[in-house]
Amino acid sequence: MTDGADLIIGIDAGTSVIKAIAFDFSGNQIASSAVRNRYELGPDGSATQSLPRTWAECVVAIKGLSKEVDNLASRVAAIALTGQGDGTWLVGEQNKDVCDAWIWLDGRAAPTVARLKHGANERARFEATGTGLNTCQQGTQLAHMAQHHSDLLHRAEVALHCKDWLFLNLTGMRATDPSEACFTFGDFRSRTYSDTVLDSLGLYTHRNLLPPIIDGSKDTLPLSASAAEATGLLEGTPVSLGYVDMVMTTVGAGVHTGESGVACSAVGSTGVHMRSVRSEDVHLNAEGSGYVICLPVENMVTQVQTNMAATLNIDWILSVAHDLLAEDGQKIAHADLVKRIDGWMAQSKPGGLVYHPYISDAGERGPFVDAKARASLIGMNLNHRYPDLVRAVVESLGMAARDCYQAMGEMPRELRLTGGAARSPALREVLASSLNVPVSASAREEAGAAGCAMMAAVAIGVYPDMDACIADWVTPLLGEKQAPNPDLVPIYETTFQTYQSSRKAMAPVWQDL
């Protein structure tokens, strides 16, 4: 650490935006820089992202901070990374990309998932990883490539994730972290790769593609000379490889602060629902769904269920209004439509309709896995109007969250929220009343970047451990608890039973569609 260094840069490389955030050692956000990222969707279910372009846009985001912070390079004590989870970022000779990354939205591995789910060792694989198979994961994507695109694996030397690719460009080292390594290929108890898992995926002969595992809360690598030249930062600056973004986001928002029974949901484009438990207390459901992802805390993991689409459903229902108004010559911004949601909620009856929020082309992955799952609206009659549709979509996010937490065992006693939707009073009320627990929203604006920056703060010795850092960076930012609405709780209890029974009954219909 150079004399006078007092900042940590946290980089969160999301699917659509790459953010670089400067924090001081107490966790205060000093400056931010963001760059839009891009991915391409194909008619075959593909969703891909350029590796070189992602690195170039990361550089732009880092350089953007220098415009906000004087003498940035000399003030940076460490750089930390997190990014979009799952997906496959293949790297070959001279650390060049083999092809565009298959990101988490890619649905091409669906036939392989269906085949592997019936394999003889599938339950053993699930009990090691704690993670259900789905099309998002690197394991299933590599298994699909091995069968249908073997040339890609022949040209590859290592299989990385998004943040790992950026770490390689910053340090020259090919590596991944315990979270992504273990929920795809390893055992969450030992935090190492598992031969049982590789065998079950048919990937043992491709074990050479798996990079070393390093923990960014304990070890850092120096910023390389080439990366220093590209970013304008100082060569040798410590670089910490953080855990996957969903873990970093919930760490920054309060999933682990020492109390039992606390859960955290990140409600954004996707819905990520997590509870922090000891490794020996993990509840593995009979359906074989969800994730178990290591925390950067000794013997602690997060149980996770993720909805493929959360606020993407709200975006869809608002786009219906936008398109109809546009036909009449009225131009209205998406943000202005968002402001109308609370008003539409007030004009509608709670629990009047049931909507299943499976709007993604990739189907659903939590608390069940079905690539053919699709959204549905149940219970309409002639009296229903647009506000009723909006309410049904918003309420579905509460139903989906409860569905996910129920699959993880004991229901939480408190829910903490992060993500853009956490700012909505209407959604907070829906979530509190759907789960019948108090809800609070973290005031942390960039929880993902903060989570990985916290790991770097521990790695360079600013804090002795993650718990001490959490006490300063997280706990003071937890907002006041919002109690469930007693009038809504019994309504949503009935709505949930209908939601769950009807989504189970819809499975054969999705197959026919």
Image (cartoon, grey):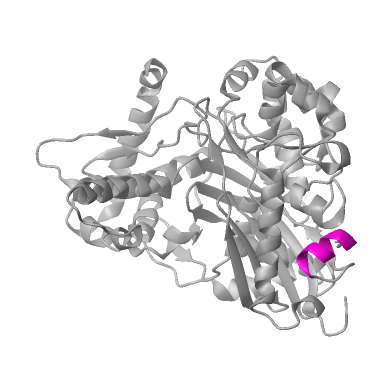
Asked if the magenta segment contains residue 226, the reply would be yes
x then y, percent, for residue 27: 66, 75
**Above or below, comparing residue 169 to residue 6 in the picture:** above
For the residue pair 475 and 238, the one nearer the viewer reads as 238
Q: Residue at x 67, y 15 (%)?
A: 119
Q: Residue 471 at what x, y percent from top left? A: 67, 73
Is 204 included in the stretch rendered in magenta?
Answer: no
Position of residue 416 relative to residue 376, above or below, is: below
- Residue at left 54%, top 68%? 445
Quadrant in the picture for residue 75: bottom right
- Residue 386 in the image: state x and y as whole percent: 19, 47
How far across and how far down the image is residue 139, in percent? Answer: 70, 30
Q: Residue at x 45, y 72 (%)?
A: 480
Q: Quadrant of residue 111?
A: top right
Horizontally, is 421 left or right of 196 in the view?
A: left
Quarter of the image with the N terminus is: bottom right
In the picture, measured across the screen, residue 43 lies left or right of residue 475, that is left
- Residue projecting furthest to the left: 382
Magenta residues span 225-232
Quadrant in which residue 123 is drawn: top right
Q: Is residue 243 visible?
A: yes
Eyeballing the image, is 253 above or below 156?
below
Q: Which secondary structure is most common in the magenta stretch?
A: helix
Residue at (34, 40) in percent of width and height: 496
